[in-house]
Amino acid sequence: MAFGQAVRAVRTEQGIAQEELASLAEVERSHMGKIERGEHMPTLALILKISSALGISAAELMGATERNLRTDTETSGGV
């Protein structure tokens, strides 16, 4: 879910529709929806395509994912 949250946050911040991002990343819109909802964990190749379509580095996208994971852990009473 953390990766999908990061993708959705960057996408909406940039004003890109989910369908447009899917097209730019060369994936089906339904697949992009599953990624954003955390129903599918993308491969490294797909992470690279998505980050490129968003115009950011994969490292930036993974950094946002890590922050989401930390936030999720803290709010759920984890470590």
Image: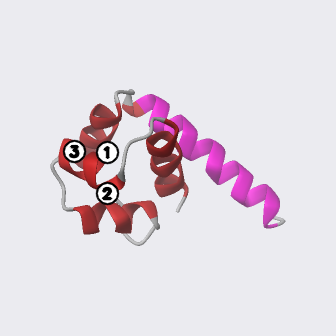
Residue located beneath label 2 in the image? 42
Residue 32 point in image, percent of width and height: 31, 60
**Secondary structure under badge 1?**
helix
Please identify, in this view, whether the residue under mark 1 or under mark 3 is nearer the observer. 3
**Which SS does the magenta portion mostly show?**
helix
Q: Residues within 10 Å of mark 2 (few under 14, many from 20)?
A: some
Q: Is residue 44 left or right of residue 37?
A: left
Please identify, in this view, whether the residue under mark 3 or under mark 2 is nearer the observer. 3
- Residue at the (64%, 43%) spot, across then down: 67
- Residue at the (53%, 54%) spot, across then down: 5
Label pair 3/2, CB-CB below 8 angstroms:
no
- Residue at the (29%, 46%) spot, across then down: 21
The numbered dot on residue 25 is 3
Label pair 1/2, CB-CB below 8 angstroms:
yes
Query: Which of the two labelled residues, at mark 3 and mark 2, occupies the earlier sequence position?
Result: 3
- Residue at the (63%, 53%) spot, across then down: 69
* Front residue of this view, candidates 73 and 5: 5
Q: Is residue 14 left or right of residue 30?
A: right
Residue 46 point in image, percent of width and height: 25, 48
What segment carries the magenta color? 59-76
Which residue appears farthest toward the bottom when viewing the image? 39
Residue 40 point in image, percent of width and height: 36, 68
Measured in 3D between alpha carbons, the distance from the residue under mark 3 to the one under mark 2, in whole angstroms, is 12 Å
Q: Amino acid at mark 3?
A: Ala
Compared to 35, does 43 lie above or below?
A: above
**Secondary structure under badge 3?**
helix
The numbered dot on residue 61 is none
| Observer able to see residue 79 | no
Residue located beneath label 1 in the image? 47
Q: Residues within 10 Å of mark 1 (few under 14, many from 20)?
A: many
